[in-house]
Amino acid sequence: MNILICIKQVPDTNEILMDEERHTLIRSKAANIVNPFDMYSLEIAARLQENRPNTKVVIVSMGPLHAEEAIRTCFSIVGDIGYLISDPRFSGSDTLATSYILSQAVRLIENTEGTFDLILCGKQAIDGDTAQVGPELAEHLAIAQVTNVIEVTSEETLLTVTKETETGYAICTANTPCLLTITKLSREIRIPSLKKKLSARKIPLEHRSLKELVGLDEQRIGLQGSPTRVVKTFTIPRKTSCTFFTGPDAVKELMQTLQDNNHIQEVAL
Amino acid sequence: MTPNTKEFWVYLETFADGSLRPVGLELLGKAKTMCVSRGWKVVGLIIGYQVEKAVEEAQGYGCDVILVVDTIELSYYATDTYTDVLCYLIQKERPNVLVLGATPDSKDLAPRVAARLKTGLTADCTDMGFQETGDVVEWTRPALSGHLMAKIICPKERPQMGTVRAGVFPLPYFDKKSQSLIRRENPRLSSAEKQISLVKILAENTSNLNLEESSIIVAGGLGLGSKKGFDLLHNLADALKGMVGASRKVVEAGWIPRAYQVGQTGKSVKPRLYIACGISGALQHLVGMQDAHCIVAINIDADAPIFQIADYGIVGDVFEIIPAMLEELSQLNTIKAL
């Protein structure tokens, strides 16, 4: 089986600091990490490769040159080769333009690595949180998709896929080729061994840019190729303070306050 | 695609039992207020099998038109058939706007449709409204895990598409006398073999756990001490006619199924009231619930970060405070009943 994993380097949003007075982002302080949902894709692929050793795993990322570091991190879990797709003209791309560039990159990489049976994407990236690039990529490639997947097993060209739903799980079979978006797994992600970390340095990492993406329509990328525009960003000021209730009547006062403010109105008969 | 209609489409998703999901109705209400002064039509879209009950219900919420596709091939959600149907309708009728609830199925569907039609889609919005002049909708959504809000537009391509979270807009009033024009469509569906087939559904014991659509959530964290602590939480949720939520740590500890998880790797909720019990308030949890209209925190640790975003707080033991809350509730109810 031939697997492609799409990953993204993102700022660690738990480390982001806001300039509270100017309501702007202090982005430079945030460390860059591999998008957490993409880490789950790596675990899924590593498991598939263990069970079927003739499986090839290719990692692709679209991003700035320092995203190379993120692909290297992935290699310590899984990956036989990586591709970083970088070009200044990609910047400003929204989800439609991004997924279009990725679809062109997939076609380019397939020329060398062969057709992919399975494409894995994290459910969403924690910086944009749209969950749109995976399904949009599947549409550009005209292949089937399953979203919110937590488990995959394979048998020849048929995959058995467990998908998280609002009320539990659904089990589907999927013919390859297909694209899966992976959400938080019910098991832990493996911790890379030292040996794996060391050998990760020797895994080939190729660079590609716009000039290699022959056939890509430049009208469909970057800011000008993106149907959506951000017109404004702003922060919502944090709530000023919490009102604490203390003393023997604390609960009584709290419930009365909630009642008075109609927060629990439906309850009162 | 040039729009030739002043139509605002709202996708009305149904539950498995055929009833309408509240989020679609909330969006109908908002669409109606947006469109009325501009003379635009609000069109409700109902796709499925045996959806008559939903069509009936939708009429009471003020759609000008209800567009219905009712056929056995649509008896459950599948990406390919639903994408085909939606794209067929859009290409035929050319609406200016299409909004969907940010539910798991609609978030599977909307990007597929947007990519096929090469139009713009804004995800997980918390507000929408027309710009002062023209026909462009401004979509508001959180970015960077809620650190920042962004206003996004789709100036040229049509339809302008967005998915909007549940609980953002109030449910409109139901008017039994309200009538809608009903248009039925019968697109021809592809008979190609299915690439994805549903084998079975494994429901956890969480009947219809649509946490995102609950107006009251009582959530628990490690402070509950054990799996048994959640019994108390369920009692409080039941008394408030709300639902139970949970932090990541207790889900990972196996105290409660994952469908209850609120936060970055769980669900994003915006209830009217969120009561956090024994939750310290890791940022990953806060990003999933900080937009609640009112947040109450109960925690033994006065320095817990959850208090920084709470409206009301009590520092103390959840095992003393929750029973006292139940007691207060039964008294409040008795007074009302008199």
Image: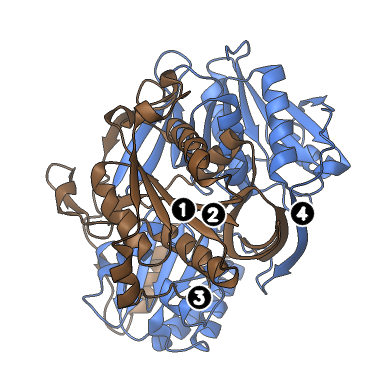
Chain colours: A brown, B blue
Do marks 1 and 2 share a chain?
Answer: yes
Q: Nearer the viewer, mark 1 or mark 4?
A: 1
Per the rendering, the mark at residue B197 is 4
Q: Is residue A98 above or below residue A50?
A: above
**SS at circle 1:** strand
Marks 1 and 2 close (CB-CB < 8 Å): yes
Residue position for label 1 = A58
Q: CA distance from mark 3 to mark 2?
A: 21 Å
Q: Nearer the viewer, mark 4 or mark 2?
A: 2
Q: CA distance from mark 1 to mark 2?
A: 6 Å
Q: Quadrant of the N terminus of chain A?
A: bottom right
What residue did someone put label 2 on? A3
Q: Position of residue B74 (x, y in %)?
A: 80, 43
Indicate the secondary structure of the residue bearing disc 2: strand
Q: Give the residue type at disc 4.
A: Ser
Q: Which residue is mark 3?
A: A187
